[in-house]
Image (cartoon, rainbow, N blue to C red):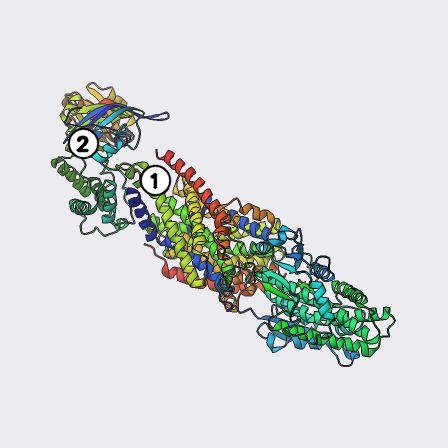
Amino acid sequence: MSDDQAIQVRDLHKDFGEVYAVQGISFDVHAGEIFSLLGPNGAGKTTTISMLSCLLEPTKGDARVFGHSILGEPIAVKAAIGVVPQEIALYPDLSARENLNFWGKMYGLRGAPLRQRVDEVLEIIGLTERQKGRVSKFSGGMKRRLNIGIALLHKPQVIIMDEPTVGIDPQSRRNILDNVKELNRQGMTVLYTTHYMEEAQELSDHIAIMDQGKMIAYGTHEDLVQIVGELDRIDLTINAESARVIEEWQATAGVHEVSAEDGNLTLLVDDSNLVLPRLFESATQAGVRITSAEIQEPNLEAVFLHLTGRALRD
Amino acid sequence: MRIIDLALKDLLQIVRDWQSALFLVVMPILFTLFFGLLSGSGAAGDPRLPVGFVDHDQNSALSASLQSLLETSDAIRPVVLEGDEADRAADFVRDEDLAAVVIVPAGFSEQTLRLGGSTELAEVSGQALVGEEPRLMVIADPTTTAGRTASNAVQAAVTRLLGAVETARLSAETYEARSRLEDEASRRAYLDEALALASDAWSQPPLSIMVEQARPPAGDEEKVSPNVYTQSSPGMIVQFAIFGLNTSAMVLVLERKSRTLQRLLTAPITRAEVIAGHVLATFAVVFIQQALLVGFGQLAFGVDYMREPVGTLLVMATLALWTASLGLLIGAVSESEDQVIMWSLVAMFVFSAMGGAWFPLDITGKAFSTIGHLMPTAWAMDGFQNVVMRGLGLGSVLLPAGILLAYAVVFFALAVWRFKFE
Amino acid sequence: MKVLDIALKDMLRSFRSTFALVMMFVVPLMVTGIMYFAFGGLGGDGGGFDLPVTRVQVVNLDQPALHSGFSAGQILVEFLQNEQLADLLEVTEGADETSARAAVDDQEAGVAVIIPPDFTAAVTAPEGSATITLYQDPTLTLGPDIVKGLLSQFVDGFAGTRIAVGVVTEQLSKRGVEIDAGLTQDVVMQYAAWAETLGQSQSGGAHPALDIQPPSSETEPSNQGAGMIGAIMAGMMIFFTFFTGASTAETIIREDEEGTLARLFTTPTPRVVILGGKFTAVFVTLIVQVIVLIFASAIIFHIRWGGPLPVALVTLGLVVSATGLGVLLMSLLKSTRQTGPVMGGVLTLTGMAGGLFTTGFQNLPAAYETITLFTPHGWAMRGWKAALAGGGAGDVLLPAAVTLGMGIVFFVAGALVFRKRFA
């Protein structure tokens, strides 16, 4: 393993009986980078980081975190990582400070260093004024911030964040994304899982796209977009049931992929200038009205659609 | 209509939770069985308290008489202890295997009869039989009911024994005043004969007491035959009517926590209708629970609730109304599931214990009994017992039902006042 | 060290929970308090128990006219109306048997005493018998028993006189001695005098022929006050200690559901340490609970629990078995949804089987006693009763050892299941 590899994953598998949650994935996370695992729900992202956090034992394969094997040296791995779980994992009947004190002890901090670090983390997450408040009385956003703060107590080398922005308001989401970037600016390696393409796009140095337990693409944002090459992406909304027109459009020359969700359609086409009129024509013939049409630069959604035939949010 | 819809929704939530069946039906039946079986455990055998009998005065006239007097007691029965068992007499009492032990010391008969015949012994007083008086020993725990009952019964038997001794002494004295007993042996024989006659007479004393339980008027006598479940069945119905409230109060609390209550209020339904719907559901749960337990009591335990069906129904309905208002109050003041369980348990313990559901109030102290009779549960017990134990009619349950209704109104008012919609 | 951190965190959460505090301390003390109040201290202070007053309707149907003004029935009525019995009985004379019975039926009286027409005749004549009827409210127990006891005592006095006369007459007749009225009168007077003196000595508290002793001769006088209230408190303490053991162990499942257990597993803390910390919390919480209950009940109810060593041994056995059973029960459950029936159902059933709810029941069947031997509750109860009775370490050793052993077995089984589950 080279010095700049924070995480090395080699042929990781995880089966739950007949369910193959992770099927042989391999990737590297460089030290100091933000690495995203992007994929829809059920792709195997959480299972992958559960293995990296030593919560689950892989059925096959291994991974190393700063040289420590998850199979052979789990304690060393855990000392090196900070985990922010997707669900809030706090003690609601303890105060913010009491939660941080306890978790700090679990990471080996004690006495004055612990107290000092708790003060620092409270400052980072903006909860200094509310440190004595019971967590059960906190707003959702405050709980999320504390949830992240616990992972920072022991100044880990790697922070693993499992879909930290699910179900929160845009402002809190913005705050979290800014925090992630700031942590990374300070030198922390971040392994980030999400099903939001724009987050992966905004944050990441490298992205791995997962679907149904497999890694289907890996690289920088530019590398991945290249997969769809010169294809254009067209987003359409129509005013009617889409089934009858999808078949038509799939058969239309120049159309590579069509995906539909509740009247919103995404198409990958060779040349939007040439294809768009054909789409309008067949829509008219089918008695369907196109209410909006947008031509987009290829993005990760398009990449996913191209690789799987499904939209990222399906 | 919305009230009924809301009540039906509550009932559906309760019925779908299988734990409800456990708390509402299974546990009360188990408890009734348990306490009924234990109370009546002696019915098949001898229900009298076992009292150990250790005879160190083997084969003496007095110890034999005493043993036969103990046999004829209606409160206790002697259990002869010999050898090792005799040495462990105190242990048997401490371990509550025996209610008491009577120990006849060696020479008891001889000394008692000799002293009983002494004409120099003029006074029988509180310091009777001074000097080397022969004394029986009774080992009993005076702080337990069994111990007190047993020692009272032993004392009664011993008093009869002493009566027989005194009778023998008087007879000998009277005879000697008119004739002569030749020697000590003759005297002894005379006394023994007197003792035997007196003991025999005491086995069927000329004056006795017959206890009769109050019965309904002639014609209904067959129907009311109190058994061991007659106390435990109504008591368990009352107790578990209260404990079962945790199921319906839980619905209220969960509705508030999940914010479905707030959503309900955005629908065209008034707050009064919301409360009424919940009360109706609780009433239905408690009433159905009681119906099941009354049915079980009637069919399985032979507790004759149905000898006065309207009266029984009236008590059930008013008890259900009061417990519904209590359930509403618990749901109103609780903020979490834990609090619901806690308040339900506290209410169950306080109202059941103090209201006579666990033990009859007549065996408690005056102050407790007076306060206990203020409890609504005491009135519910009165209502049920008037029917199943006293064999009375509809008129006898009107007052208890009326009081339960009044309590329902008070608790309902409290609950409405405290009900939080947020 | 981390074991202690985890244990302290769990204990902090427990002792902050109102529900937990109420179930640990308030309810057991409250229930015992109710019983204490109900039964007036049960000899703890040697008094303070006011027996309820029983309303008695007495109907004197006795026809003494033929007996020169001597009326046994009237004497009985006066006996019941004696001022000395006013604390126990409220006596009214009924007009006739029907109205007296009706008074009981209508709950205006608890007991009707019906003196038969031939009562005096039975007292004075050499032959014949009479029966006093005691018609009682079937829902009452203590009051009618008291009345019956008093009547028996009174009636035995007369019966004894009749028997004395009968025996004397029979023996003398048999030996050819002439019986005259003066002789029988003499016997009656002497026997009556003897009976009266005997009665006076008994009401003075001493019986001329017997001594009553409590079961433990080593018991200090102060320990006699433990009695039933001590056993009731012991039963409550045992039940709620097992309850707390289960509910504290439940936090393992709850943390699993809340996600904080998984989070703990992501920290560089060995799982055995994490589980060890949680088990330690259960154990220490129970120690605190038992100690507080012992002291609180000693102060409030004047219960003398016994010598320090026997109490410590019984406490250790109880706490270990409650910890062990709690851990085992919770290890078998999948979610907190299932814990309700366990807490309510299983613990209550084992409590019933262990004899915790039957303190004061008389004449329990032998089979039931055997069943209690299969539960840690039954053995814990034995241990506490021995300690309360003033027993020494030797007296509590067996029950303490059995509860300790059971607890260790439960604990090992439960810990193994948890370890496998969270491996």
Tell me, yes or no, if residue C348 can be seen here.
Answer: no
Residue C286, position in %: x, y? 39, 50
Q: Nearer the viewer, residue A285 or B90?
A: B90
| Label 2 secondary element | helix
Q: Residues within 10 Å of mark 1 (few under 14, many from 20)?
A: many
Label 2 crowd (10 A; few <14 / some 14-19 / many >=20): many
Q: Which is nearer the eye, A236 or A289?
A: A236
Which chain is mark 2 on? A
Which residue, given by chain and number where applicable, does mark 1 sit on? C275
Judge whether C65 appears above or below C353 on screen.
below
Q: Position of residue A39 (x, y in %)?
A: 24, 29
State the mark number for residue C253.
none
Q: Is residue B319 left or right of residue C271?
A: right
Observer able to see residue A213: yes
Q: Chain of mark 1?
A: C
Q: Where does the C terminus of chain B fall, quadrant-wise? A: bottom left
Give me the disc on residue A200.
2
Residue that lies at the very extreme toward the bottom in this rendered image: C69
- Identified by mark 2, the residue type is Ala
Query: Left of A194 or right of it: where is A20?
Result: right
Q: Going by the image, does B225 lie left or right of A104?
A: right
Foreground residue, C383 or C367?
C383
Residue that lies at the very extreme toward the top in this rendered image: A253
> Separation of disc 1 and disc 2 at Cα?
38 Å
